[in-house]
């Protein structure tokens, strides 16, 4: 459907969506007892053309998220990224780490100690420290990446020894649920885990960022304590998969 719309019409839609989504995030933040600026809105840009990403940036979006290393690197030259933070949010293979370290401001999808070790190694080679989030598989689904709740403590103990990586918080993609209460339950579980780990002391590990909530459920996520929502289709329209 989107394909039938002219580019100028789609630019208009992205502009409208940006202000609507920003308002909804702000409202949810206030409802959760926080300030609107305490919850960041990320524009998820996978499969989105640069012209629309630049439109979102012109509308004041200061954080973008891409899933794939290759797609990000090929679109990057066309993006107006001054003052914009870039996060990698998709599953990262160890053999791609070399290409992305130093190119993004944060890797949100650290889902194994081995991946953390590789990021640490490649960051050291560049003389930098890479901020990351630990991805948690809160629904314990076989189909999803991420640490299980049970593995997290041991993983943190190991990751704490890596000096060229700094853990800034957690990220999750919860199971798809029909009922709002079930959705909130998973977010609430995740928030509790985040709080639990905030009080543990590990070297190089802080709990500042809780990245959860997407187009269908970002308000529920904010109400349960999310500090960063990752919104794609609600901003840019449904994705056209090639
Ligand atoms: C695609 C994606 C999103 C955004 O999903 P929408 O439902 O389009 O908002 C958020 N997080 C991750 C990790 C994604 O892959």
Image: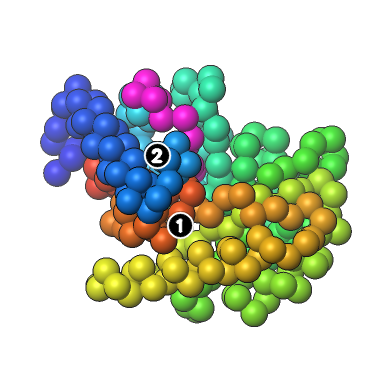
Q: Which residues are magenta?
A: 57-66
Q: Quadrant of residue 20?
A: top left
Q: Could you tell me which residue is drawn at 47 percent across and 47 percent down?
A: 228
Instruction: Examine the rendering and report whether any part of residue 117 can be seen.
Output: yes
**Residue 84 drawn at (x, y percent):** 52, 27
As measured in the structure, the alpha-carbon distance from the residue carrying label 2 to the one carrying label 1 is: 12 Å
- Please check the rendered image and state whether residue 80 is part of the magenta-colored stretch, yes or no: no
User: Element at badge 2?
Assistant: helix
Quarter of the picture containing the N terminus is: top left
- Residue name at image x 24 percent, y 42 percent: 237
Number of callouts in the render?
2
Q: Secondary structure at mark 1?
A: loop
Q: Residue furthest front?
A: 33
Q: Tell me the quarter of the picture where residue 127 sits.
A: top right
Disc 2 CB within 8 Å of nearest ligand 1 atom: no
Q: Nearer the viewer, residue 70 or 82?
A: 82
Residue 225: which disc? 1
Q: Does 9 appear above or below 154?
A: above
- Circles 2, 1 touching at the beta carbon (< 8 Å): no
Label number found at residue 41: none
- Write down the quadrant of residue 46 in the picture: top left
Q: Of the residues under marks 2 and 1, which one precedes in the sequence?
A: 2
Neighbour class for label 2 at 10 Å: few (<14), some, many (≥20)? Answer: some
11, above or below 200, in the image: above
Give me the residue at 46% from left, 54% from top.
226
In this picture, is 171 found above or below 101?
below
Asked if residue 40 can be seen in this view, the reply is no
Position in image of residue 190 (x %, y %): 50, 67
Q: Residue at x 47, y 30 (%)?
A: 62
Residue to which mark 2 is pinned: 36
- Where residue 222 sits: x, y (%)? 39, 54
């Amino acid at each position: 459907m989107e394909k039938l719309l002219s580019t100028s019409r789609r630019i208009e839609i992205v502009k409208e969506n940006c202000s609507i989504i920003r308002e909804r995030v702000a409202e949810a933040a206030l409802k959760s007892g926080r300030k609107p600026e305490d919850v960041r809105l990320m524009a998820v840009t996978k499969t989105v053309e640069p012209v629309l990403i630049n439109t979102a940036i012109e509308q004041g979006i200061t954080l973008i998220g891409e899933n794939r290393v290759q797609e990000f690197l090929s679109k990057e030259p066309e993006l107006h990224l001054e003052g914009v933070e870039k996060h990698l949010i998709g599953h990262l293979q160890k053999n791609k780490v070399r290409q992305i370290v130093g190119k993004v401001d944060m890797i949100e999808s650290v889902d194994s100690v081995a991946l953390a070790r590789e990021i640490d190694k490649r960051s050291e080679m560049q003389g930098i420290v890479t901020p990351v989030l630990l991805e948690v598989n809160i629904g314990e689904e076989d189909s999803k990446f991420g640490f299980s709740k049970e593995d997290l403590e041991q993983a943190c103990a190991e990751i704490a020894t890596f000096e060229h990586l700094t853990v800034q918080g957690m990220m999750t993609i919860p199971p798809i649920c029909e009922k709002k209460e079930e959705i909130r339950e998973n977010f609430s579980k995740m928030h509790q885990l985040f709080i639990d780990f905030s009080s543990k002391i590990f070297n190089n590990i802080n709990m500042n960022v809780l990245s959860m909530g997407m187009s269908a459920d970002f308000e529920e996520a904010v109400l349960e304590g999310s500090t960063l929502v990752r919104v794609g289709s609600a901003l840019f329209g449904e994705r056209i998969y090639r």
